[in-house]
Every structure is written in structure tokens, then in C-alpha cells.
Image: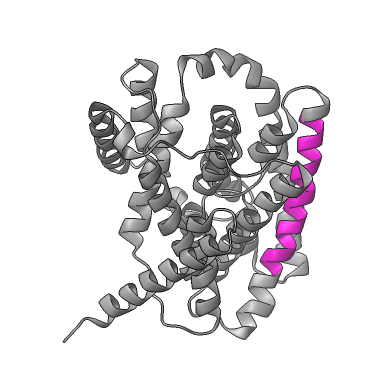
Amino acid sequence: MTNPFTLRRFGTLLLAAVGTTVFAFVNMPLPFLFGPMFACLIAALLGAPLQGIAPISEAARTILGVAVGASITPEVMHQLPQMAGSVAFVPIYIAAIGLIGVPYFHKVCGFDLPTSYFAAMPGGLQDMVIFGKEAGGDVRALSLIHATRVLVIVTIVPAILVYAMDRPLVQPIGEPASELPLRELLLMSVAAIAGWAIAKRVGLFGAAILGPMIVTALMSLTGMIEHRPPREAILAAQFFIGMGIGVGYVGVTLLELRRIVLSGMVFVVILAILAFAVTEAVVLLGLASPMEGFLSFAPGGQAEMTVLAIVAGADLGFIVVHHLVRLTLVILGAPLVAAAIGMRTGRDKSG
């Protein structure tokens, strides 16, 4: 008999492909990201038995890691001292999010303290869910809140870029594979596979992106690689990332929609206000252009912000540095602060 999980995965892939086709046909922006995302999201909310392909979705992120690494050139390294001023706003931004977000989730929404704390932290979805679980938080609520944050940010950021900043998302995402040197294609493949494997082995957070990024950056800085991954690879990464976001809502009940998802959507409004304030500050101080400042402090997922930065023609190196600092500070600092305020995490238990 055919494995029901296999049938669900096939059906999910087919649905995502249909969503991509429809979005492309009506000329919507980023059809390979938004088509699968909204098709799977709507189907999930209607109760369809979707099944994601987690290993492939995670592997797709290695492509974006390579794309980011390829953008780290000697010129970007020379610009690092100039980024210090805007990077200094990142810890202030994180502190403001925590000081507002934790009381919001705890006092207003009624979640317990561990859930409220890790729901407010603007880190990676997987990391915050794991830390929250170890601290005794509600894993389902954390998953839905962070998924909602990513979903809403990824949806509204392109609209702001296009309509508020007059920045159409039409920049080429990469050259076709047929136009890239075979040697570089092979090196990118090695960087993606080896970087991911090594990063997982040493327990690096965000291994699927950061491992390939580090290896590719080294290749870029030494002149071994001069191009981004091919267009086809980046489109495939968008497809599986979009599908994964939509599938994250499988099994959501009406009660969860009213309480958890709605709470997450209101929190995104809070995040948007804080991001706007910080962006205004760095722009007025001459530390960043409006678009680079906006994309650097938009609290979306690293992979999704990378895609948007590429298609908007933004300074990818500048934006990635800020997101890496945010994620590093949150992932390293969140468990320490949690312990300081009385929550015990897995790190505390094992230490």
C-alpha cells in the first residue's frame, strides 16, 4: 500500500506548484515564495491534511546560505567599521522588544511566563521553540506565534518596499545555471553540503544557513567564487521555504486562531512600530539608507529577508550583518536572561 505520508507530501507539492503557477499567471511578486505559502496556508486553515518535507525545506536554506556567503566580498569587509553605528542599535532594539513583548504576552494575552518570554524574543523559530520547551513553555503556542510573525512580516515587507519606498522587486535573483562556470557550481555545491554538515556537527544554530554561508564567504574572500547560486536554485529555495511556512498552520483550531494567532498578529504590529522607530533613527543619523535600514531591522526570518534583499537590489552584506547580530544576541542571550529571571532552561539543567 502507498504510504499515506507519501501521498500527503505529493499532494502538498502539487498544491504548492498550483499556487506558484497561479501567482505567476496573475503577475504577483515572488510567485515561487508567495504562491506555495498562501496556497498551503489556505488549505491548512481549511483542514487539508498537508505534509511538509522538512529535510528538503531545511536543505533549501543552504542555497540561501551560499547566496549570502557569496555576497561577502573584500569590499563588504572593508565596510564593516562603517556598519558599527547601526549595528549598535541591534541590542537596544532587542531589549525594547523584550520589555514590551513579554508583558504583552503575559499580562494581556494570558500566556505563562516561559511562553511569553520566548514568544517575544525575535530569534529563529526552531531555536525559540526548543528553548521555550526546555523552560516549560507551550510549544504549540510558540510555534504558531513565531510562524505568524514570519508569515506577516514576509507578506507586508514586499508591499512596503513596492508602495512606500517605490522599490519594485524586479532585480535578478541570479544568473541561469547554464551561464555560470561549472567550477563555481561545483564549489557552491561543496560549500552547501560540507558547510551544513560541519555546522550541524559542531551544534551551530541556524546550521543550514550559517554553515554554507561561512564556507562560501571564505571562498568569496579568496576569489574562488564570484557569482551567486544559479537562478533555478534560488527559486527552488523560495518554493520550499514558502511551502514550509504555509504547512506550519496544519491542524490549527478556531480557538488557536482566536487566541494564539491573533495574539501573534497584534505582536507583529508592535514589532513594526519598534522597527520603524529604529529605522528612522539610523536613517536620520546617516547610518543607513531607508531601504537598507528597513530590511536590516525587519524582524522576519533570515532566509526570507535574504530573498527580499536580493530581489529588491539591496546591500545584502549590510543587511545580513544586522540579522546575524540580532540572531546571535537572542540565541546566546535569551537563555541567560531566562535563567536570571527564574526560568530554568536545558542549558541550565545540563550545566
Q: Is residue 244 above or below residue 309?
A: below
Give left or right: position of 123 versus 233: right
189 lies above or below 131: above
Instruction: Confirm whether residue 260 shows in the render.
Output: yes
Instruction: Report whether residue 36 is seen.
Output: no
Farthest-out residue, left: 1
Task: State left or right for residue 55 relative to residue 114.
Answer: left
The residues colored magenta run: 263-282
Q: Can you say which quadrant of the picture contains the C terminus? A: top left
Q: Position of residue 92 (x, y in %)?
A: 72, 36
For the point 37% across and 50% down, the residue is 60
Residue 98 in the image, given as x and y percentages of width and height: 70, 49
At x 42%, y 50%, the residue is 235
Indicate whether residue 144 is drawn in magenta.
no
- Determine whether, in the image, residue 183 is placed left or right of residue 280: left
Q: Position of residue 83 (x, y in %)?
A: 64, 21
Q: Nearer the viewer, residue 163 or 4?
A: 163
Q: Toward which corner of the image does residue 150 lie, by quadrant? A: bottom right
Identity of the residue drawn at 81% across and 41% down: 277
Coloring applied to the structure: one colour
x, y percent for residue 193: 26, 40
Q: Main secondary structure of the magenta part?
A: helix
